[in-house]
Image (tube, grey):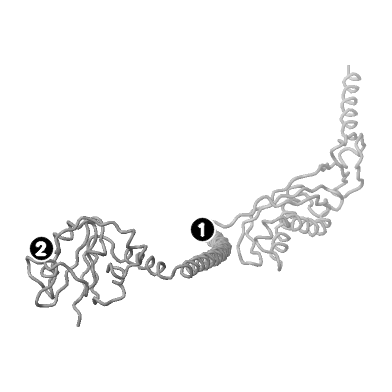
């Protein structure tokens, strides 16, 4: 019985000793064998390992790529526009012996704290350099800045036994107290750009209008020039025609032009000409001076009672008679009724057409206008 109990105890002790002397290293880990706190062996390959029980111990470290999120910090680029920046890093333990010597018993927590301090200092240093503005940080050059931070942090992290794989800036924001001022400045810049675009558009429109106005002026000037040329040619042709007609029969040409002058002068119902009786304008109003062809072509119209034209102001009855005679005038004016002053006229017409003050009397046809010649001086 005692032998059985002793055998069981020995077996349990041997089992505990065997279990304490065997360890397993996972493929995701690296292991250090410590003896009284001193590193005696490093095992980086996965598999079984043996150690002295109760004297040696196994410390394992993760061999995978680890992540670290840095604290949010405030940086000031060269344009003095403060920014709130935070970043994250990817790293792994490259040298577990140096890592153990650097962080001691703190392990990964101590490594994260020290690596975070290194990253923050490098972020401030890189983003605060000359020629690095907030616009540069927010532009496509951001990748260059992140690679620069990674390279500088990598060189410092080697002393910790760490390898920095990558560094990225997660967000770059303005402080809350600067947002309003920044937005106002952005609006002002956009307004200035819009004003520049409007000014350039107005300048282009002005050039187009000026070109259009010049084209219109040139077109109108050319059209007026051609019109003046055409009018000149037409006037030359008309003058040549008149000259030819005048050369063929000067007397009839004078008569024709006088008729045209009468037509232009005696228009409407109130045309009154104040002329002397011996004016050249009345040459063809007298039957004795009309050309033979013109006299033969005349048609005698019904004769109306003569109208006595008052001298100077005149009297009311005479003025009324003048208005009534003008309204009731016949259709045509004959030169026989408009005889010359020295021609023999019927006694009754002479008595009715003259008075002591030297006034004149003219017989007119319906639809024509009274012509009032002034008394001879």
Q: What is the number of callouts on the image?
A: 2
Q: Residue furthest top?
A: 1
Residue tagged by mark 1?
180
- Residue 203 in sight: no
Mark 2 or mark 1, whichever is nearer to me: 2
Quadrant the N terminus occupies? top right
- What x and y, as percent, mark residue 353? 14, 69
Pointer 1: residues within 10 angstroms few (<14), some, or many (20+)?
few
Quadrant the C terminus occupies? bottom left
Residue situated in front as seen by the camera: 267 or 242: 242
- Image-based side of 275 in relation to 99, left or right: left
Residue situated in front as seen by the camera: 68 or 76: 76
Q: CA distance from mark 2 to mark 1?
A: 93 Å
Task: Judge whether 98 appears above or below 51 on screen.
Answer: below
Q: Residue at x 78, y 56 (%)?
A: 147
Task: Identify the element where label 2 is drawn.
Answer: helix
Q: Which mark is residue 278?
A: none
Pointer 2: residues within 10 angstroms few (<14), some, or many (20+)?
few
Give the quarter of the image for residue 284: bottom left
Q: Residue at x 23, y 66 (%)?
A: 338
Q: Residue at x 80, y 44 (%)?
A: 65
- What x and y, as percent, mark residue 307? 14, 64
Residue situated in front as seen by the camera: 201 or 256: 256
- What x and y, as percent, mark residue 355? 10, 74
- What x and y, as percent, mark residue 324? 13, 59
Residue situated in front as seen by the camera: 59 or 185: 185
Task: Judge whether 140 appears above or below 192 on screen.
Answer: above
Q: Residue at x 88, y 29 (%)?
A: 13
Task: Identify the element where label 1 is drawn.
Answer: helix
- Residue 359 in sight: yes
Q: Which mark is residue 320?
A: 2
């Amino acid at each position: 019985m005692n032998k059985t109990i002793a055998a069981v105890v020995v077996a349990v002790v041997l089992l505990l000793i065997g279990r304490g002397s065997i360890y397993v290293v996972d493929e995701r880990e690296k292991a250090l064998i410590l003896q009284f706190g001193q590193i005696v062996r490093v095992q980086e390959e996965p598999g079984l390992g043996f150690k002295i029980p109760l004297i040696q111990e196994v410390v394992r470290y993760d061999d995978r790529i680890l992540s670290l999120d840095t604290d949010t910090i405030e940086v000031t680029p060269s344009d003095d526009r403060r920014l709130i920046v935070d970043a994250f890093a990817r790293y792994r333990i490259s040298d577990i012996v140096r890592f153990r010597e650097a962080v001691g018993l703190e392990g990964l927590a101590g490594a994260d704290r020290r690596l975070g301090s290194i990253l923050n200092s490098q972020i401030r240093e890189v983003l605060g350099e000359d020629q690095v503005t907030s616009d540069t940080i927010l532009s496509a050059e951001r990748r260059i800045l992140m690679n620069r931070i990674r390279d500088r942090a990598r060189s410092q992290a080697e002393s910790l036994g760490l390898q920095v794989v990558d560094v990225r800036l997660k967000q770059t924001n303005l402080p809350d107290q600067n947002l309003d001022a920044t937005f106002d400045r952005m609006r002002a810049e956009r307004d200035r750009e819009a004003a520049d675009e409007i000014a350039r558009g107005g300048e282009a429109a002005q050039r187009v209008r000026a070109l259009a106005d010049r084209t219109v002026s040139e077109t109108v000037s050319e059209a007026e020039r051609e019109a003046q040329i055409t009018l000149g040619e037409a006037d030359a042709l008309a003058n040549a025609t008149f000259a030819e007609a005048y050369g063929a029969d000067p007397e009839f040409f004078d008569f024709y032009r006088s008729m045209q002058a009468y037509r232009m002068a005696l228009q409407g119902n109130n045309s009154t000409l104040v002329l002397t009786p011996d004016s050249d304008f009345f040459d063809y109003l007298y039957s004795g001076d009309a050309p033979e062809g013109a006299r033969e072509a005349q048609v005698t119209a019904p004769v109306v009672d003569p109208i006595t034209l008052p001298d100077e102001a005149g009297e009311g009855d005479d003025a009324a008679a003048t208005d009534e005679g003008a309204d009731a005038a016949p259709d045509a004016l004959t030169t026989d009724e408009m005889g010359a002053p020295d021609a023999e006229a019927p006694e009754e017409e002479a008595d009715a057409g003259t008075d002591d003050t030297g006034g004149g009397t003219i017989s007119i046809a319906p639809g024509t206008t009274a012509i009032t010649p002034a008394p001879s001086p």
